[in-house]
Image: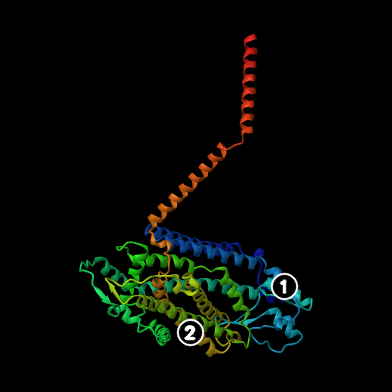
Amino acid sequence: MAGGAEGKPKPLEFTPTWIVASICSVIIVISLLFERLLHRLGKRLMRSRKKPLYEALLRVKEELMVLGFISLLLTVFQGAMGRLCIRRSVMRHLLPCKPPPLDGAAENAHFGDAVFTGVLGGTRRLLAGGAISGDYCINKGKVPVLSAEAIHQLHIFIFVLAVTHFILSAITVLLGVAQTRNWRHWESKIQTSNDTAPEKFKHIQEFTFIQDHFKGHRKRWRIFGWMRSFFKQFYGSVTEEDYRTMRLGFIMKHCTPNFNFYNYMIRALEVDFKKVVGVSWYLWAMLMIFLLLNVQGWYVYIWISTAPFLMLLVVGSKMEHIITELAYEVAQKHTAIQGDLVVAPSDDFFWFHRPKLVLLLIHVVLFQNAFEIAFFFWLLVSYGFKSCIMANPAYAIARIVISIVSQLLCGYVTLPLYAIVSHMGSSFKKAIFDDNVTEGLANWAERARRRTIISSKTTVNVSDPPIDEANDAAIQMTNTRAISSDEQGTSLT
């Protein structure tokens, strides 16, 4: 008995102070080092005038704060959830694993202890507080709604998911920027070229852009164009002629000929990264749905992992088909053109006339991939590869392979296409102005707002009703009489 008592976990009041102080010191030092690392990274981004990336870093800090608050809530309400008891029959519905046939004391042990085996070693029991809560419900003939061990695993999974989403989003953007490195050379070549040759008339079919994307007006070609767009996204999705033509179309619609279109695209991509790296409310809602559908025998996760892959193929085909539609529209309107070929950007080419919808779809795809990869490794580390919650090993391997392929496809194909085709809408993005111009416009707008407020206050004072003026005059006359009376009294004394 004494040995068993010695082996039980000890509460904080019976733990040596040097252990408590040492553990807290290590945690605090690690936290401070991480905070200073983020601080120095932010200062470096500001010095290098990477304001969108700095704002993305602030968004990451916000997500970390949300994770910390979720962790705090789970910890604070751990005891309350352990004492929230429900019937055992409720626990046998929508299970990720089929429970073994248990009865009596074995069933109490199954629901009370919640023992599992992981690859990190051995069998782990619930925390002491969780065991007490489990006994509390078992004594009432019920089971706790969520055990302490389940809350602990939920802690780990949410943290792993958020970190995985951030890392994969950053890797995807880096892959996309690396894939567009040739575009910088194309932009430099255009900026340094001085073509002063007289502009000549050319038949529409003499332009390389038209030859690549337009084969005729027939309906059959329109259907074949979608098939061609689907396959072209995998090889040479954006050629130099495509870049030159779309760049010229954007410049002729929005800005001057010497505009650096490549720098504008990269700035816009950095701004979009700030949106993609965050976990919005609809992504949290998706997470709840994914966790709800993880039921034994449904095999929903194999379809969830396939959905982002198919969505990326559709988005990439649409982006490539928009380039084809640009060529088709010019070929329909003109037979011959003098000078360079100029396309007409328009929101009509995009789904529901909303270019921003493409970014939303990419955001959802990245989060789904992060969920699949984080969920796989979390299960692998916590429960092992052959656990029942991992389901069929072949399905698990297929899911992780599809997720990795989707991630590479998004970085190397879909994101570069989005980086240039998203600017073929009717309007331009705020990133068209550099940081100095943006800051100057913001300051000018703030000063104009203040002047408007001051002028409105002045107008209100001038347009006061006459009765107030009469009252003011009466008050002034009364004060004058009082002053004169005081003066007379002073002179008499």
Q: Is residue 271 above or below residue 237?
A: above
Residue at numbered disc 1: 133
Residue 210 picture quarter: bottom left
- Between residues 45 and 201, which one lies in front from this camera angle? 201
Amino acid type at mark 2: Ile
User: What percent of the width, then of the height, locates residue 230?
Assistant: 42, 84
- Find numbered disc 2 in the image and state the secondary structure of the residue it sits on: helix
Q: Is residue 36 above or below residue 402?
A: above
Percent of width and height locating residue 396: 53, 86
Callouts 2 and 1 close, C-beta under 8 Å: no
The x, y position of residue 197, in whole percent, is: 20, 69
State which quarter of the image contains the N terminus.
bottom right
- Disc 1 crowd rating (10 Å Cα; few below 14, some 14-19, many 20+) is many
Farthest residue, direction top: 492
Q: Nearer the viewer, residue 28 or 40?
A: 40
Nearest to N terminus: mark 2 or mark 1:
1
Q: Does residue 70 appear left or right of residue 339 in this picture?
A: right
Q: Residue at x 72, y 72 (%)?
A: 133
In the image, residue 385 lies at what x, y percent? 55, 86
Horizontal side of residue 81 vs 196, given as left or right: right
Distance, label 2 to label 1, CA atoms, is 41 Å
Eye-nearest disc, 2 or 1: 2
How packed mark 2 is, by other alpha carbons closer than 10 Å (few <14, some 14-19, many 20 or more), is some
Q: Residue furthest right?
A: 140
Q: Residue at x 56, y 72 (%)?
A: 283
Secondary element type, mark 1: helix
Q: Amino acid at mark 1?
A: Ser
The residue beneath circle 2 is 402
Q: Nearer the viewer, residue 340 or 435?
A: 340
Which part of the image, by quadrant, shows the C terminus?
A: top right
In the rendered structure, find residue 243 and report the number of the disc placed on it. Answer: none
